[in-house]
Amino acid sequence: MVNHGYPLGSSILSIAMAMLGALSLIFPLPLLTQDIVDSERSLPLLGDHPLEERLIDGMDEGIKKNYRGAIAIFTELILLDPSYADAYFNRGIARAKIADYQGAIADHSQAITLNPQLAEAYKARGKIYWQLGEQAQAIADLEAALALFSDQENLVSQREAWEQLQTWRSNP
């Protein structure tokens, strides 16, 4: 286990890291070599993060509708790497599925802070704002997602965001 500058034995983080290190002996975390895309659950995985296989485990729990199990896995990943935007994004998706909308908004916001190019996080957060009746914020987020999808030349997601915006604007 790597000591990230925290004095061993002097913090809860040290204990959590030790426990997660022990878990990694049971649940190995090899690199992923394939790409997976599903805009409702996940982002494209490109094999560039050592925790991606565990991220996929969390997404699999979400597919099985075990959202609390998914949240636990994504939380584990966040403890291991607090800068892992994809873990926050996916935990936000799972939290929204169990109607923890404030938690989902917080997770999507953190994902955006860590990776401002994460268009899907803007889109997901916008959908939650819309459900909560915060139309202006919802539209602002979806417009941000639309601009990013356009910049990223993601034509399918760009069209979906544009169509969603048209629907929202016609039904305030």
Image (cartoon, rainbow, N blue to C red):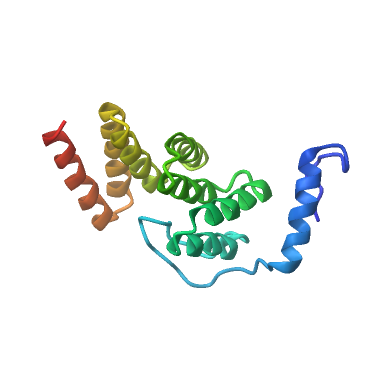
Q: Quadrant of residue 36?
A: bottom left
Q: Is residue 144 visible?
A: no
In the depicted structure, whether residue 47 falls above or below residue 126: below
Residue displayed at 87% across by 43% down: 8
Apparent side of residue 9 relative to residue 134 in the rendered image (left or right): right
User: Where does residue 129 sit, x and y in percent of width and height?
Assistant: 33, 34
Q: Quadrant of residue 155?
A: bottom left
User: Where does residue 172 sit, x and y in percent of width and height?
Assistant: 16, 30
Q: Is residue 133 visible?
A: yes
- Of 6 and 46, the residue lying toward us: 6
- Of 108 and 131, the residue lying toward us: 131
User: Where does residue 89 sit, x and y in percent of width and height?
Assistant: 47, 47
* Residue found at the very far bottom of the displayed protein: 33
Residue displayed at 37% across by 39% down: 125
In the depicted structure, whether residue 161 falls above or below residue 36: above
User: How many discs appear?
Assistant: 0
Report the quarter where the N terminus lies. bottom right
User: Where does residue 44 sit, x and y in percent of width and height?
Assistant: 43, 60
